[in-house]
Image (cartoon, rainbow, N blue to C red):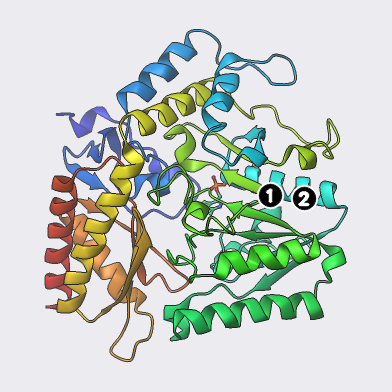
Amino acid sequence: MADATTYSDNRQYLSPVWSHYTDIVVDHAQGPFVYGTDGNRYIDFTCGIGVTNTGHSHPKVVAAAQAQLGKIMHSQINLLFHQPMLDLVEELLPIVPAALHSFFFSNSGAEAVEASIKLARQATKRTNIITFTGSFHGRTVGTMSLTNSNPIYRIGYQPLMAGVFVAPFPYAYRYGWEPEATTAFCLRELRHLLATQTAPSETAAILIEPVLGEGGYVPPTPGFLEGVQQIAREHGILLIVDEVQSGFGRTGKWFGFQHYGADAYPLEPDIIVMAKGIASGLPLSGIAARPELMAKWPTGSHGGTYGGNAVSCAAAVATIRAMRDEKMIENAATMGDGLQGRLRQLQEEYPQIGDVRGLGLMVGAEFVTDQGQPDGKLAKAVTKEALHDKLMLLTCGPYGNVIRWIPPINVSAAVIDEATGIFAGALKRVIG
Ligand code: PLP
């Protein structure tokens, strides 16, 4: 076990702009567990905010990255093609829709969202973008303008990028409405927005998270995404799905949008934004888009020094192969059902858990007061107690009242049991 005195502690020199959920200094991590320099083992159900979907340091991913490090680390794409990127394309071709077989790679989620917006503007020669209430798309100047999950991301940074319009996301539980009524209302409001604020002729794209992430872990109500696609098609507006958090097996399918649409009317986004889980923790992001759109993106008008780094791409190739070979996507669907079932049992005991929802292993438990109001204080107290018993859980939602469950997608039933047991203990200590 590591001796804490062998570690230097310079935390006071780090910028206070970073908030810190724990004061743990990590020594190493493996699978669903993080080991602190304090000698403790923590169950990590945060996955570094939805990144380490294959678990920490999956041996196949580590081996692939290590092998690539010894070959070439930085192979700048404007100068050299590199094999890991070409291999990554080979892995992505079967998992994205055939219509989206053109790829651009970058480093972070925000960068990929920005790329999607820049592409949409060039391809349509229109300026405006529609996003949704509760959305989170990043923290760069462009993406914070597209983000509505919490004002902290924009206070003090105005003016924002112009040309962004916001439509209501179908968060049925918050509205207190039935799903059908919520879908109808939100689609009506989207049409209203196009009729009153952003003319279709000026609207380049509708950008949506297939499951709202930071905004509260909310899957859209049935029929909503299909309705959005229909409206987009009617007006020649592009549909961009931000799969940064919901992609790469998280929801029990490769991508969150694949839960929606029917054979007769499939959901066919024009651009998919990918990041986080794609490379198990090495920085990599990208977009997949229709080749006919990419053809309208003038060469040299976008790019970056590091985009599609060779080591990150090698890690992504190993990530996708491991997910496929070890049936992690199927595991996410099964374990997610079990996790939601266990949380629903706890909900019966604790009415303070107002709603349990999610897809696969992207699961939210929303805490409310007796009056049904968001109870962020309670959610925070429960996560604090869980951490005391070495379970790491994050909150989300504008009021911080949703506890989100983001285990690795290859998590075992035993670890889920251990975690929900700790959670039940935390509820008992906090609520009684
Ligand atoms: N889009 C979504 C849906 C996200 O959840 C995030 C990050 O949480 C981003 C974009 C931004 O990604 P990054 O933090 O890598 O820039």
Residue 294 lies left or right of residue 281; in this view the side is: right
> Dividing the image into 4 quarters, which one contains the N terminus?
top left
Q: Residues within 10 Å of mark 2 (few under 14, many from 20)?
A: many
Question: Three-letter amino acid code at disc 2?
Answer: Ala
Question: Three-letter amino acid code at disc 1?
Answer: Asp
Viewer-nearest residue: 416 or 240: 240
Q: Mark 1 or 2 closer to N-term? A: 2
Residue 115 position by quadrant: top right
Q: Position of residue 332 (x, y in %)?
A: 32, 47
Q: Is residue 160 above or below residue 419?
A: below
Viewer-nearest residue: 206 or 67: 206
Q: Secondary structure at mark 2?
A: helix
Q: Which residue is mark 1?
A: 270
Q: Kindly check if marks 1 and 2 are in contact, taking CB atoms under 8 A apart as contact.
A: yes
Q: Is mark 2 within 8 Å of ligand 1?
A: no
Q: Residue at x 66, y 35 (%)?
A: 101
Q: Position of residue 400 (x, y in %)?
A: 40, 69
Point out which mark residue 249 bears: none
> Dividing the image into 4 quarters, which one contains the C terminus?
bottom left
Q: Which residue is mark 2?
A: 120
Q: Residue at x 53, y 50 (%)?
A: 243
